[in-house]
Image: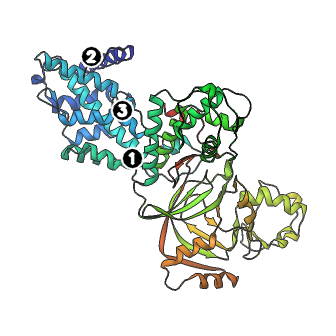
Amino acid sequence: MVIKPTLLGIAVKIKLLFLSLSLSVASGITLAAGIGEFNESTNLAKLISQNRNLCNTQLRCGSKFTTQFYASNKNRLIWSQNGKVTAKAEAMLTILQNAYQDGLQPNEYHVRELEILFDQVEESAETGQSPPAQVLVNLDLTLSDGYLLYLDNLENGRIKPQQAYSNWKISYSPRNVLAQLQTAVKTASLVSTARKAEPQLPEYQALKKQLALYQQIAESGGWQIIPAGKNLQVGDSGARVGLLQQRLALTQNYSIAESSNSLAKFDNLTKLAVIEFQIENALSATGVVDNITLSALNQSVNSRLKLIQLNMDRLRWLPINLGSRYLVVNIPSYSLYVSENGKKTLQMPVIVGGGGENKTCLVNSKITTLELNPYWGIPNRIASKEYLTKIKRDPAYLAKHNIRMYSNSTNEEIDPATVAWESINQTKFPYFLKQDPGKGNALGKIKFIFSNDCGIYLHDTSNPNLFGRNARSLSHGCVRVGKPLVLADYLLANNASWNDKRLNTAISSGEHNWVKLANPLPIYIVYQTVWVNSDGRLIFKRDIYSADNKDFPIALIE
């Protein structure tokens, strides 16, 4: 495995040489001798503990588990025997070199440095000499650290959501990967360990297939820019139409005949391919290539790859296996679906939170309870900012909308007519507002409850006309569902005494009621701007919360 010398390779070699020299000085150990004079158990521990460069740089010990791994293995070298790297070490290097297949970056797992170290060991073998001890130490630590970093990124995500989105509440529980490496070393199951670490859900695997397709397109040079000009439609011809057809042939279910660009004609098949592209990119499906469609067509293959990588990474924030039955709300697609055994059995539109403080947070929980004819406890930020203005404009507003007002300090109900509203402002709003069940209640007829840190839930709505809009980031953070009774029927299927007739009767009574689910349903609220639909199409949606910002955090993926 001899690497062609490059400026980068030379720089890495210098870095490794400097590190090796510093290790020798810091530890007081003569490492230039053959491996036979190297007491690995003693010296490796000293190298880790005495030399700060070893575990405080990106070159070594980027994973917090590296020192723990060696301590638990009596500080012995793992990946070489008798001065030669083992087959397991070769297999691990191959895994790291192929990290791009997972949408990850091999060089973040020390691949360039490792290739040089492996070459140094190989060169020593070719001359019949044992490699210098520091080379084997460097190789061992770097390889272990790279694999631990890789496992962590593959299982928990490369982007840590609390750091990337500090003002956005996200359910996230990273998993410890140290035990997985220990098992992999003992059983020589490095490849299967890596595959078990990646998400098993169909949504992730489908994106991974699309990643491979777009990587092939990128390796072939991508697609050419279609120059600006007049709208392209059926009947047009010329070089721009030829470039359009070449672009569509790369990603759409579309093939073109061998012809020169100057003779290309925009026919009905081209129109159908344009419509397909527009649907996949959340554009108006007109079949006409206007400026907006042209801009989407001209996005580079690398920008598409980054979006696929980013959305694969977000799926790593979820449990590896979501189970056989679960509900997903995808915020950018304004949609909800229930999956059973890998198939979508229920789908409906939703309304999600607007931007800023009204963002819908990401959730990993279980729907446990239905609330029929619910009360709405109006959050203080909504009451003080929105309702206060309405009350000052019309003191009878609360009564007209069946909203009661209570004292925050005593919980006693307060008559709004007794309040000097001119003295009340947003920062001084000492009341709690609560809307009674019934007609006009903002939560509608039913509420779906699950534990979360954001105080959100799924619910019906008193204004179903809003589902007619294409852009539906309109709520204060909760998720309004388009078919609440259908969802309730599904959730109550395992409650023996409940059926759709009893549900309708209970709601029609107007009485407030709670129903515990016999079989709680896992719910995952996610933010996927790219996904593969049930037809196998790769869908790109608008980034409504600017979470795909090109500078942060997507710039972390280079």
Instruction: Give the Cα separation between the discs numbered 1 and 2.
Output: 35 Å
Q: Residue at x 79, y 74 (%)?
A: 402
According to the image, what is the colour scheme of the structure?
Answer: rainbow
**Residue 111, placed above or below residue 272:** above
Q: Which residue is mark 2?
A: 21
Disc 1 from disc 3: Cα separation: 15 Å
Judged left or right of residue 510, residue 148 is: left
- Compare residues 141 and 193 and report the one nearer the observer: 193
Residue 5: name its quadrant. Answer: top left
Mark 1 and mark 2 in contact? Answer it, CB < 8 Å: no
| Disc 1 target residue | 155
Residue 455, given in percent of the width and then of the height, sits at: 61, 61
Q: What amino acid type should be assigned to the residue bearing mark 1?
A: Glu
Q: Earlier in the sequence, mark 3 or mark 2?
A: 2
Which residue is disc 3 drawn over?
109
Residue 455 seen in render: yes
**Distance CA(mark 3)–CA(mark 2):** 23 Å
Residue count near mark 3 (Cα–Cα under 10 Å), binned few <14, some 14–19, many ≥20:
many
Report the residue at 50% width, 33% height from top: 556
Q: Position of residue 172 (x, y in %)?
A: 48, 51
Residue 249, located in which quarter of the rendered image? top right
Indicate the amino acid at tag 3: Tyr
* Res 428 visible: no
In front of the other: label 1 or label 2?
Answer: 1
Q: Is residue 480 above or below residue 141?
A: below
First reached walking from the N terminus: tag 1 or tag 3: 3
